[in-house]
């Protein structure tokens, strides 16, 4: 696993925690920390999480190395 994979997985965890807080508590943690859902920093983070999710799809198709 290279450094890009690790960063992508970290962003996926951030996105998962955010969606969990939205689902359970109706609280957007990223939006609250970075200026609401329409804030530029929030939109950048949401975009990075989406790109990371697409990157992590490639993990399903890679061969495992011992």
Image: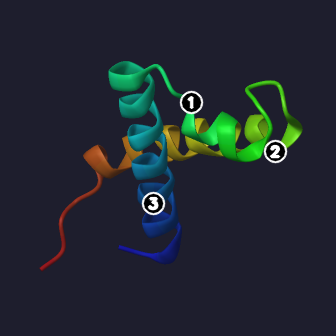
- The residue sitting at the left extreme is 66
Residue placed under numbered mark 2 in the picture: 41
Give whichever of 66, 1 is nearer the camera: 1
> Which residue lies at the image location 40% right of the left edge and 42% below the top edge?
17
Distance of mark 1 from mark 3, alpha carbons?
18 Å
Q: Compare marks 2 and 3 and give the one earlier in the sequence.
A: 3
Q: Quadrant of residue 16?
A: top left
Q: Which mark is residue 10?
A: 3
Element type at mark 2 = helix
> Which residue lies at the image location 56% right of the left edge and 30% below the top edge?
28
Q: Quadrant of residue 10?
A: bottom left
Q: Which mark is residue 54?
A: none
Total number of numbered labels?
Answer: 3
Distance of mark 2 from mark 1, alpha carbons?
14 Å
Residue 7 lies left or right of residue 62; in this view the side is: right
The image position of residue 3, as x and y in percent, is 50, 76
Give whichever of 13, 8 is nearer the camera: 13
Element type at mark 1 = loop
Q: Quadrant of residue 66?
A: bottom left
């Amino acid at each position: 696993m290279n450094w890009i994979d690790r960063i992508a997985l970290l962003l996926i965890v951030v996105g998962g925690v955010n969606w969990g807080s939205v689902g359970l508590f109706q609280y957007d943690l990223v939006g609250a920390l970075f200026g609401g859902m329409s804030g530029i920093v929030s939109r950048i983070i949401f975009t990075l999480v989406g790109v990371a999710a697409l990157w992590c799809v490639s993990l399903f198709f890679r061969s495992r190395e011992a």
